[in-house]
Amino acid sequence: MKTSKFRNMSTVDKIFVFLVYFILSLILVIVLYPLLYVVAASFSDPQAVIRGEVFIFPVRPTLRGYEAVFQNKKILRGFANSFFYLFVGTAVNIFMTILCTYPLSRKEFKARNKISLYFVFTMYFSGGLMPTYVLVNKLHLIDTRWAIIIPMAMSTYNMIICRTFIVNNIPDELYEASQMDGCSPFRYLLSVILPLCKPILAVLMLYYGVARWNDYFNAMLFLNKEQLQPLTIVMKEILISGQVDMTKVSDASAAAKLQGMSDLLKYSTIVVGSLPVLMLYPFVQKYLVQGVMIGAVKG
Amino acid sequence: MKKNSTTVPAVKPNKIKNSNWQFWAIIALPMIYAFVFAYIPMGGIIIAFKDYSIRRGILGSKWVGLKYFKQFLTSTSSVTVIKNTIILGIYSFIASFPVPILLALGINEVKNRFFKKTVQMVTYAPYFISVVVMVGMMRQLMDPRTGIINVLIQKLGGDPVNFFGDASIFRSLYVWSGVWQTMGYSSIIYVAALSGVSLELQEAAIVDGATRLKRILHVDIPAIMPTIVIMLIFGCSNIVSIGMDKIFLMQNDLNASVSEVISTFVYKIGVVNANFGFSTAAGLFQSLVAFILLVAVNKIAKKVTETSLW
C-alpha cells in the first residue's frame, strides 16, 4: 500500500509527486550551491574569482588561499584558542550537566521538583546583558579564558533534554537492584548512568560543541586581549570589518591583485573555519534527530 | 538467601535517607553556578532603576526610579528601534514559520530513500555554520562587483544590487538568509511528527479515493497540528526577542535606519557608551514584552486548540 508505484497513480497524483520532487530539487540547489561555490572559489585563481569566471568548479586551481590562511599568525592563534574553548568548554558543560541531571532524575531525591523549578526559572528570566557584564567584571574574569568557559558552564535546555532521556530510557529497577547490592548514588552515577548515557552524551556534545565553536558574541564582550581571541573573532575581522586599503595602491593591476588575494583569503578562511564542524556533521547527524525528538517530548 | 532478603527492608529506608545528602552533594555545584550566573544578574536588574556608576557599585548608586524607562519609551530614536524590532520580528516569523512545515510535508511524500536522505542531510547542514561565517559568506557572494550573485544578475541582464548598502533590502536579506540557514533544522521536528501519522488513517483515505494533496490536508496536517501549535507559541513569543548575533554583523551605516533593533541598541548603549542603567532598562523592557507575549499566546492557544505549553 505504502510503496504504490508511480505508474499506478492517478494523473493528479502524478503531477503532485512531480511537483514535490521538483520543488525539493530546487531547494537542494539553493542550499547546496552557495556552499559549493565557496569551496570552488577558495581553490581558484584569484583573478578568475573577481572576474566572475568561477561557477561551480575551481578555475585554474591553486592552493594560495590556503597557504595564506596557514601563514596568517592571527588565524593560527585563533584556531588554537578555539580548540581550547571547544575542548575545555564542552568538557565543563558535560560535567556540569551530568551533575545537575542525575539527582533531578532520581525520584528518591526529595527536593527534586523544587530544584527543577529553580533551574527552569533561569530559562525564562535572565538578568540581561549589562548585569551579566557587571558580574563578570566584578569577578575579575574579563580578559581571562575563564570568561568564556564559566559563565556558560551549563544550558538548562540541554539539562532537561538529558534528564528526559535518563527518565525514559534507564529503568528504575536498575537503581533499586543496585541499592540492594549496596551501591551508593555516587557509584551508581559512575558505573550505571554514565555508560548507559552514551547516546545522549553524543547529542549534548554536539549541541555544546557547536555552540562553543561558533560563539563570537561572548568573546567580543569579555575578551579584549588579542592572544585570547577565538577564531570567530579573527574571522569577523577578516570577513566583516576587514577592508583592503586601496588608497595606498596607486597601480591598477596591483590593486586588482590585492583585491583578488584578499577575496581568496576570505573564501579559504570560510572553508577552514567551518571545516571542523562540517566534518563531524555526517557522523552526528543521526544523533541530531534524536536530540530534537527528546527535546520535543518535553515541549 | 532468604535471610538476606528479609534484612533488606530494614536497611533500605535508612539507605535512602542517607543517600539524599549524596544527591545534594552532586547537585551543589550546578546550583551554585545557577545562583551566581543566573540569579545574581537577575538581582542586577535594579541597575535599570539606578544611576549606576562602576565606582559606587550597584548598591551605592543613586535611585532614579523609572527615569530610564520613560527615556526609552519616549525618545524618538528608541521608538524607531522598537518599531524596527517588531517589523523585523513579524516578518521573520511569517517567513520562517511555514517553510519548515512545507519542507517536512514534501520530505514525507518522497519515497526514494536516497533522495530523501540527501535533501535532509543538505538542508540541515547550514544550521551548523556560525553567524560570522554566514554573514561573511553573504558579503562575499553578494559583493556588488565580484560576488557571484551580482555576476549572475548581470549575466541575466539586470543591474548589480548593493545588498548590504541598501536599507530597503536589509529586512528581506536578514529574514530569507535566516530561512536558508534554519529551514532544514526546524523541519526535523515536523518530519518526526509526520512519521508518527497512523498508517491506517492513510490507507482509509486511499481507499476513499483521496488524492495525495487531500491526504496531506485532511490526514497529515491535522495529525501534526499539536506540534505546529507548540512551535507557533514559541515563534510568536520570539517576535520581540531578536538576538543581536547576526544582525550586529550585518549592520552598517547605510542600513542602520532599519537594522537597529532593541538588542543591538542595548549593546551599544551599555557596552560602547557605558550607560548601564539605560541599557538595562531597554533590555528589561524587551524581556518583559517577550514574556507577556509568551503567556498571552499560550492562553489563546489553549482556548482555541487545547494545546499549550503549560
Image: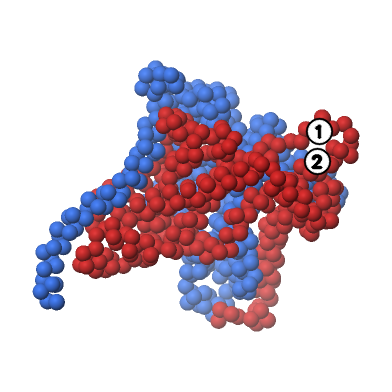
Q: Position of residue B302 (x, y in %)?
A: 40, 52
Amino acid carrying label 2: it is Gln
Colour-to-chain, blue? B
Name the one closer to the observer, A78 or B33.
A78
Pointer 1 chain = A
* Residue depicted at 36% across the width and 22% down the height: B59
Q: Position of residue B141 (x, y in %)?
A: 74, 47
Palette colour of chain A: red
Q: Position of residue B43 (x, y in %)?
A: 37, 31
Name the one closer to the observer, B221 or A231.
A231
Please say if the residues under marks 1 and 2 sit with CB atoms less than 8 Å apart.
yes
* Dot 1 alpha-carbon crowd within 10 angstroms: few under 14, some 14 to 19, many 20 or more: some
Name the residue tied to disc 2.
A259
Instruction: Choose the circle earlier in sequence order: 1 or 2.
Output: 1
Residue B290 seen: no
Secondary structure at badge 1 equals helix
Q: Is residue A89 left or right of residue B91?
A: left
Amino acid carrying label 1: it is Met
Relative to B60, say whether A120 is above or below.
below
Secondary structure at badge 2 equals helix
Pointer 2 chain = A
Q: Is residue B41 left or right of residue B249?
A: left
Name the residue tied to disc 1.
A246
Quadrant of residue A131 in the image? top left
* Residue depicted at 45% across the width and 34% down the height: A141
Query: CA gap, disc 1 to disc 2?
Result: 8 Å
Relative to B55, say whether B198 is above or below.
below
* Residue depicted at 37% across the width and 54% down the height: A98
Relative to B185, say whether B112 is above or below.
below
